[in-house]
Amino acid sequence: MNLSETPKTTKKLSELIAIGSKRWNQVFNDWGNDFSACALESALRIIEPKDYQGYRNSRTISILVGIDPKLTLSCPICHNEYEICSLVMHLNDQERWLSARITDFLAKNGY
Ligand SMILES: [Zn+2]
């Protein structure tokens, strides 16, 4: 995998999830399959439609979407602190938030 530090999109993470969540059904505790995707994977597939399986890593996805992997936010439910893309996975898998709620939360926080 050849990952440059240059973002592959000018769209915000919330916009990518909003677009992707219209194409695939949301899944929990899994990246997804041909018909489904978790919130983070739905964003990944928009910017990396062919080789997305090789990029299934929250830090890698942070770089692809232009988010500094050192930036964190706390979960509004359990208040644990996560890197932004890790928080998306946490909200999807542990808090069971639907993609639209994740999108709203990210947009309100500037992502
Ligand atoms: Zn939480």
Image: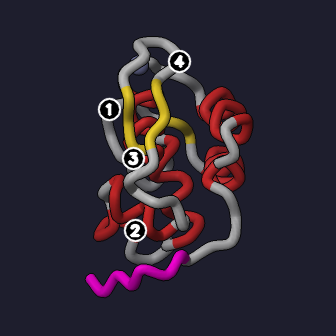
In whole angstroms, how far apart are the C-alphas of marks 3 and 2?
11 Å
Q: Residue at x 64, y 51 (%)?
A: 23
| Label 2 sits on residue | 52
Count of marks, rendered view: 4
In whole angstroms, how far apart are the C-alphas of marks 2 and 1?
17 Å
User: Considering the numbered disc 4 on the image, is that residue within a helix, a strand or a loop?
Assistant: loop
* Ligand 1 lies in quarter: top left
Is 2 a magenta residue? yes
Q: Earlier in the sequence, mark 3 or mark 2?
A: 3
| Label 1 sits on residue | 29
Q: Earlier in the sequence, mark 4 or mark 1?
A: 1
Q: Earlier in the sequence, mark 2 or mark 1?
A: 1
Please determine whether, in this image, residue 51 is positioned above or below residue 24: below
In whole angstroms, how far apart are the C-alphas of marks 4 and 2?
29 Å
The circle drawn on residue 32 is 3
In whole angstroms, how far apart are the C-alphas of marks 3 and 1?
9 Å
Task: Tell me residue 84's x, y (percent).
Answer: 47, 44
| Horizontal side of residue 19 vs 64, given as left or right | right
Asked if disc 4 is less than 8 Å from ligand 1, the answer is yes
Q: Amino acid at mark 4?
A: Pro
Q: Residues within 10 Å of mark 1 (few under 14, many from 20)?
A: few
Asked if disc 1 is less than 8 Å from ligand 1, the answer is no
User: Considering the numbered disc 2 on the image, is that residue within a helix, a strand or a loop?
Assistant: helix
Asked if disc 2 is less than 8 Å from ligand 1, the answer is no
| Horizontal side of residue 100 vs 69, given as left or right | right
In whole angstroms, how far apart are the C-alphas of marks 4 and 1?
19 Å
Q: Magenta residues?
A: 1-7
Dot in front, 3 or 1: 1
